[in-house]
Image (tube, helix red, strand yellow):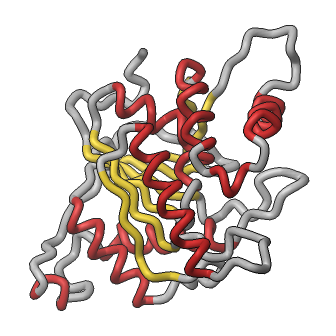
Amino acid sequence: MKNIEGWETPKVILVVLAHPDDPEFFLGGSIARWHKAGHTIRYVLLTKGDKGANQSQMSNEDIIIIREKEQEKAARFLGVSSVSYLNCHDGYVIPDLEIRKQVVRVIRQHQPNILVTCDPTNFFPNSHYINHPDHRYAGQIVIDAVFPAVGNRFFFPELIEEGFLPHEVEEVWMSLTNSPNVSLDVTEFWREKIEALKKHSSQIGDPEAFEKRMLKRVRDDNSVPFRHEEQFRVINFWRPNENNN
């Protein structure tokens, strides 16, 4: 496994996304890759996915219980060290100052080297899909939190009183992007990604049909060897002289 990331020491990687199952869908192969390489991965999700079901007999609280359990199983399967949630409601994420402060707090709390989120500029990932606003806003919140607030003590000074001191992030990796500058070959982790996604049984339907759909997404031509890549828009703060397009 080539060290495409260029990380010479173990990193703390904080994944901040909107919903349960977002990490596995967007970068499940990369998470498996990073765990195998000895890095520490933690999740902070803005919502608990309380609208992630169409069954009319289920309450929001019922859905939350199911999705928390599913996310815990998927994260544990991939070797993720912890999963925590903020208090946003599914579908109602708004990039205001209050949620920005919460994200600044959790970044300072976990002190990650690498911060992973979603590309806030990607409205239309393909011609058949409109990106969920929670995905975009999660990315916007994280980007606005990491610069300039996380490393500057004059932003949200009440966090200093709580004991959350400024922290410098080395890199931000944005998943679900149409402007990638890093592509990770995670072919060897395809099975881990699929098995982690199957833990989200309330979301995927029939597991065999789901796996076929997922394979069709990444492999149009069965005559060529299977290859799966996950792409990111990466911002390097610690290697400013490198030319990222």
Image quadrant where one finds the C terminus: top right
Quadrant in the picture for residue 107: bottom left
Is 146 left or right of 92, judged from the image as shown? Answer: left
Image height of 9 relative to 118, above or below: above
Position of the N terminus by quadrant? top left
Residue 231 in picture, x, y percent from top left: 60, 38
Residue 223 x %, y %: 86, 8
> Quick one: 3 or 238, which is closer to the camera?
3
Image side of residue 79 versus residue 188, left or right: left
In the image, residue 111 above or below residue 221: below
Q: Nearer the viewer, residue 155 or 114?
A: 114
* Residue that protrudes farthest toward the front in the picture: 57
User: Where is residue 224 shown, x and y percent of the image?
Assistant: 81, 10
Task: Answer above or below: position of 65 versus 32.
Answer: below
Q: Residue at x 44, y 68 (%)?
A: 142
Residue at 49% across, 46% down: 74
In the rendered image, is residue 143 in sight? no
